Image: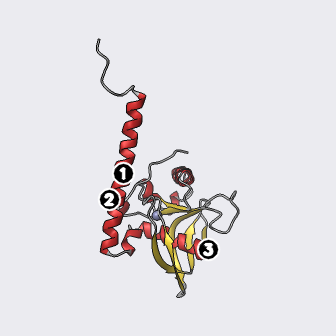
Amino acid sequence: MALRRIVRYPEPELRQPTVAVPEAEVTSAAIRELVADMTETMYAQNGAGLAAVQINRPERVFVIDGHIAGGTEQDPPLVFINPTIDWLSEETETRDEGCLSFPGVFVPIKRALKARVSAFNLKGERVTVEAAELYARALQHEYDHLSGRLIVDFVGAVKREIIKRKMKRVAREEREEREEREEAATGGGEPRAL
Ligand SMILES: [Zn+2]
């Protein structure tokens, strides 16, 4: 397992085309490793879900926290490989939604209240889940990532500019903090004269 860097908006990798995992490779070591990395990365950021594209991988794979999916906090995440949305309820709900690729940003998004999704699991079985509320929202959010659709696409032009500016500010602040830490670690300031 390895912690991966999460791609952040507006980095173009979030919009890259995704590719289905060939059926013969659904149970492969490479996909297991990808899922293990995604799981570790998601939990390191206290996320509820993560799509492969968010760690700059094109596979049509996402994971959702087991607790969100109706299990206990100890349950492993649910893995969705080559998912399809089979049904969405007409009944909708609007709630604030965040994304690990947009730290600190929440936008109100209208989603179907219930969803039915089919996907391969790591055993190579095609499984169908019925989800409601937060679980259904997470499924729709992660599924959107597979087609490059992001929370910023649900807001108007003015709000989008505000989010872009906020993301640039966050990136700049993090860079400055990193530079300060590096300077402190190397003693900082002027080099000592010999
Ligand atoms: Zn997201």
Mark 3 to mark 2 CA distance (whole Å): 31 Å
**What residue would you read off at disc 2?**
12
- Residue at 36 percent across and 60 percent down: it is 166
Mark 2 to mark 1 CA distance (whole Å): 15 Å
User: In the displayed image of the protein, which residue is found farthest to the top?
Assistant: 194
How is the rendered protein coloured?
A: secondary structure
**What residue would you read off at disc 3?**
129
Tags 3 and 2 touching, CB below 8 Å: no
10 Å crowding of disc 2: few (<14), some (14-19), many (20+): few
Residue 49 in picture, x, y percent from top left:
54, 62
User: Which dot, 3 or 2, sits closer to the camera?
Assistant: 2
| Label total for image | 3
Left or right: 156 as drawn, with respect to 89: left
Q: Which image quarter holds the C terminus? A: top left
10 Å crowding of disc 1: few (<14), some (14-19), many (20+): some
10 Å crowding of disc 3: few (<14), some (14-19), many (20+): few
- Under circle 3, the secondary element is strand
Q: Quadrant of residue 9?
A: bottom left
- Residue at 31 percent across and 21 percent down: it is 191
Q: Is residue 19 above or below residue 192?
A: below
- Under circle 1, the secondary element is helix
**What residue would you read off at disc 1?**
171
